[in-house]
Image: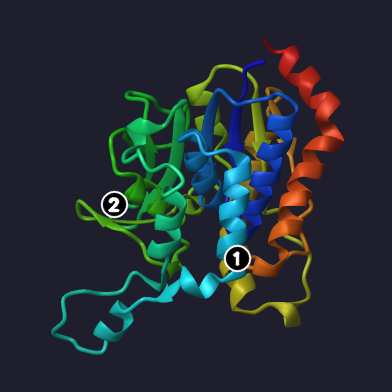
């Protein structure tokens, strides 16, 4: 029952992806290829390294219980006060401790070549204004879009780039590039899932924006909904393909950075699969 899996961005809402993976594992369904963006890129990349959904869940529980240990104010912000300092901050928050903790789950892995199945995580270069894909598969490209593709880069770079929400998390500098969250280009990388595996695609979108009152919109909503607006219509169009099965966990009323909602988000992802499991199996079987 081969299928590829596309995982959307969505900040901490990406915890729902872990619940989706748990439900798929319990049903005996494992993707043969993975494509992810932002939070989905982080989950896809770690899962492709052989980290189980249970291990991801346990690590996430530790981190969300004490986020102050893993996310720190970027010290380079202070360097901005001194005009002769050549180093400029690329984000408010330095998430390096967070990323290191997650990569410790796959201690023998160091580059994207260590992905165990065909995998892509996406980013955007703000210097060239080009979409970037990091993968373990050489000479692969989607049917649409102009992409620069790199298949042998460090996991720190690839995963750090895909999760670098513009302005919030440090954007990695690399070879005269400044790399940010792939959701800036496409928050649900269905095209990449298709490019990696010519068969059925399961697309998981955890970032369906809720209806809000203007008075409720603050910094958190501006960060999350700006990205949603840029890519939501495009993602919905691509996910409407007849060869794509869409799953949307109920995350609409969970804060973008709702650390206290971590366990609930995982359950939402798990239940989203359980609700459609018979149809999902039929979809995959009918396209083999």
Q: Residue at x 43, y 70 (%)?
A: 167
Residue 193: % across, % down: 54, 29
- For the question of whether residue 246 can be seen, the reply is yes
Apparent side of residue 69 relative to residue 52 in the rendered image (left or right)? left
Q: How is the image coloured?
A: rainbow
The Cα atoms of the two marked residues, 1 and 2, are separated by: 35 Å
Image position of 166 with respect to 245: above or below: below
Q: Nearer the viewer, mark 1 or mark 2?
A: 1
Few, some or many residues within 10 Å of mark 2 (<14, 14–19, 20+): few
Apparent side of residue 111 relative to residue 162 in the rendered image (left or right)? left
Few, some or many residues within 10 Å of mark 1 (<14, 14–19, 20+): some
Residue 127 vs residue 164, the one in the foreground: 164
Residue 39 vs residue 210, the one in the foreground: 39
Which of the 4 image quadrants contains residue 85?
bottom left
Check disc 2 and report its element: helix, strand or loop: loop
Determine whether label 1 and label 2 are within 8 Å by CB. Answer: no
Residue 251: % across, % down: 75, 56
Q: Which residue is mark 1?
A: 64
Apparent side of residue 249 relative to residue 14 in the rendered image (left or right)? right
For the N terminus, the quadrant is top right
Q: Which residue is mark 2?
A: 128
Residue 79: % across, % down: 24, 83
Check disc 1 and report its element: helix, strand or loop: helix
- For the question of whether residue 8 can be seen, the reply is no
Q: Residue at x 65, y 57 (%)?
A: 13
Residue 53: % across, % down: 62, 41
């Amino acid at each position: 029952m081969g299928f590829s899996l596309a995982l959307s961005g969505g900040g901490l809402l990406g915890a729902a992806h872990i619940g989706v993976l748990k439900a798929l594992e319990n049903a005996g369904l494992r993707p043969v290829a993975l494509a992810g963006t932002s939070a989905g890129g982080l989950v896809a990349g770690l899962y492709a390294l052989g980290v189980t959904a249970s291990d991801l869940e346990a690590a996430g529980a530790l981190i969300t219980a004490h986020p102050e240990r893993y996310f720190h104010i970027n010290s380079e912000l202070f360097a901005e006060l001194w005009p002769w300092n050549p180093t400029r901050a690329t984000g408010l928050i330095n998430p390096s401790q967070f990323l290191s903790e997650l990569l410790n789950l796959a201690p023998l892995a160091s580059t994207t070549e260590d992905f165990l199945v065909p995998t892509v995580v996406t980013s955007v270069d703000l210097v060239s204004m080009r979409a970037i894909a990091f993968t373990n598969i050489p000479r692969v490209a989607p049917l649409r879009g102009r992409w620069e593709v790199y298949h042998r880069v460090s996991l720190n770079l690839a995963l750090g780039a895909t999760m670098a929400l513009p302005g919030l998390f440090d954007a990695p500098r690399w070879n005269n590039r400044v790399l940010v969250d792939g959701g800036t280009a496409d928050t649900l990388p269905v095209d990449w899932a298709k490019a990696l595996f010519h068969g059925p695609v399961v697309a998981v979108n955890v970032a369906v924006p809720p209806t809000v009152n203007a008075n409720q919109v603050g910094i958190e909503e501006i960060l999350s909904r700006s990205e949603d607006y840029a890519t939501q219509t495009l993602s919905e169009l691509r996910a409407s393909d007849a060869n794509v099965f869409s799953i949307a966990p109920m995350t609409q009323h969970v804060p973008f950075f709702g650390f206290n909602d971590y366990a609930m988000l995982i359950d939402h992802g798990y239940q989203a699969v359980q609700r459609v499991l018979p149809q999902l199996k039929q979809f995959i079987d009918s396209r083999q």
